[in-house]
Amino acid sequence: MMIKTRIGVIVLIAILGWGCSPEEEPSVERPNILWITSEDNSPYLGAYGDSLADTPNLDRLAERGTVYENAFATTPVCAPSRFTLITGLYANAMGTENMRSTFPIPEQIRFFPKYLRDAGYHTTNNVKKDYNTIDQPEAWVESSDSATYKTREPGQPFFHVRNFTTTHESRLHDPIDTLIHDPEEMELPPYHPATAEIKRDWAHYYDQITKMDTQVGQVLDELEASGEAENTIIFYYSDHGGVLPRSKRFMFESGLRVPLIVYFPPKYEHLGPERDRTDRLVSFVDFPKTVLSLAGIEPPEYMHGKAFLGEYEDTPRTYVHTYRGRMDERFDLVRAVRDKEYLYVRNYMPHRIYGQHLAYLWRAPSMLSWHQQFLGGTLDDTQQRFFETKPAEELYRIDADPHNVNNLAGDPGYQEVLQRMREANAQWIREQQDLGFIPEETIDSLRGNRPLYDAAREQSMPIDEIIETAEQATRNASDNLEFLAEQMDHSNGAVRFWAATGFSVAERQAPQVEEVLKRHIDDPSPAVRVAVAEALYRHGFRTAGLELLEESLQADHPFVKLRALNTIEALEIEALPGRMEQMIQDLPGIHDDEWGTDYYIRRAATSIVGE
């Protein structure tokens, strides 16, 4: 796309003219920018070829705008995704990838609407934030359920966010009176059994998408009535995929791919793409740079993304990189790479099943039904896989396998592709100095009063060695046991954590494993002690493992308790020792705060011993 030099100069003059009085300021028209966001929905729209969808308003917007076929969230859940959308940074690079973290970020990093506001934009958010870090309220003129662009000064450009929760996961928990869509007409993915509850939830979900589309239509009508439609660039997108089981939270197309429609009014068409549909790869990390670029503001260098529109448009990306950390009460660590043809998934906790019990997810009738079918032994191989442990690597060819059920990682015909995608992931996590490999329960002690991003660099933390240990511990671990035994004596606790984890992942027992593990029963890192406990139990030293887990359940740090609870459930212990069972039963009464880590501990404990 040709760079719009003339407009860029005018806008730059306007931005730099902050010392002028209003009558002296150069006259320049900058576009309004409207973000319409929905929650937890994949591209289930008519504009994306979905014959079940009833979405006339978004379909009309798509007819006038550009449909992005390859748009992706950076993570398949709301809060870490919204961190990236507001900062233009990867959450795993900043230590904010785990769900509902409140860790700070370096003070020089601004929520991107602040740059718009400083340039004269009226910035308003209606209404959700959920940014997974400490808030920066100064980014907005107003953020509330009544915030509107109509409160701006005459002629002032605006950036306005209108968020709808109509398709949020919680809507599946609502009682259903009537349905618009017929459950018997639902086209289920191959991983879902055709139970009445699953078909009904799918129909219910399509009903919610229709309701959301109606709300979008009202926003567009309001914009038209305001007289600002001809001056406004419109984005519509969802905050991640979803929401039926195995979508939200999971590193598949169903959790990561989102709808994205961008409309340019005629006067600003020169800033947009030259086609009505595009297969260009777009990531959430690109959105802040793109909005600043459309406003004629040069994005700050620290942003990780690539602008895909406007004055400062970058070259198209080759890969989209995505990540998953802890989701609510369940620990996991996954990275994925997507190009236009393939999805590569790297599981760093392959000894955990996909479908770890999540209290919130299990509130959906469809999830309860699927789980009951599993317990009853009625699922086929594809449907049952959700309740099994993961391979270290997954590779899916999207055109032939849009539901990601045929893993090609072991197929001899795809080894070249596998190696290319594996290397792309390995290079990226090292470039980002990926902080997700540091156990969450150790972050507070590592960072002190600083952001983890700063602390990791000030302390010369060996991130590359931590990642390398995780790589060798979780792929072909049985071939790397001598290396892992050596790493158990490393000075860094995160290195030791991954080395200990490798002994649980390994399919065979290492020589002298008892000696290696028992030497670290008193390891100074609580995360290492939990990993050692699991490895001891899995290798047959059950008494020692259980004693160490009991100690961890009494730890001061709540995330140590949470990891111990995760481990106890994963081990599927047939009969808990009486003392341990009583300790777990007591935890909900000890951790009684309504939300946050206490909530996670209550849910994890209840999952083991019941209400």
Image: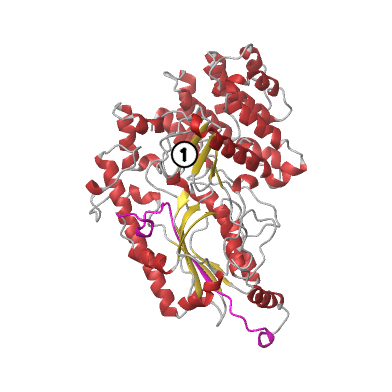
Q: Residue furthest bottom?
A: 23
Q: Is residue 88 left or right of residue 572?
A: right
Residue 227: % across, % down: 45, 81
Q: Which residue is mark 1?
A: 396
Q: Where is residue 160 drawn, in percent x and y? A: 51, 68
Magenta span includes 199? no
Amino acid marked by disc 1: Tyr
Q: Is residue 430 left or right of residue 122?
A: right
Task: Answer with the quarter of the image where residue 474 lies.
Answer: top right
Stretch of the chain drawn in magenta: 22-51
Q: Foreground: 525 or 312? A: 312
Instruction: Looking at the picture, tell me which residue is in the foreground, 191 or 586.
Output: 191
In this rendering, does residue 307 appear at all?
yes
**Snapshot quadrant of residue 226:** bottom left
Q: Quadrant of the N terminus?
A: bottom right
Crowd around label 1: few <14 · some 14–19 · many ≥20 (10 Å): many
- The residue shown at (65%, 56%) is 303
Residue nearest the observer in this picture, 558 or 132: 132
- The verdict on residue 30 being magenta is yes
In this rendering, the answer to whether 153 lies above or below 454 is below
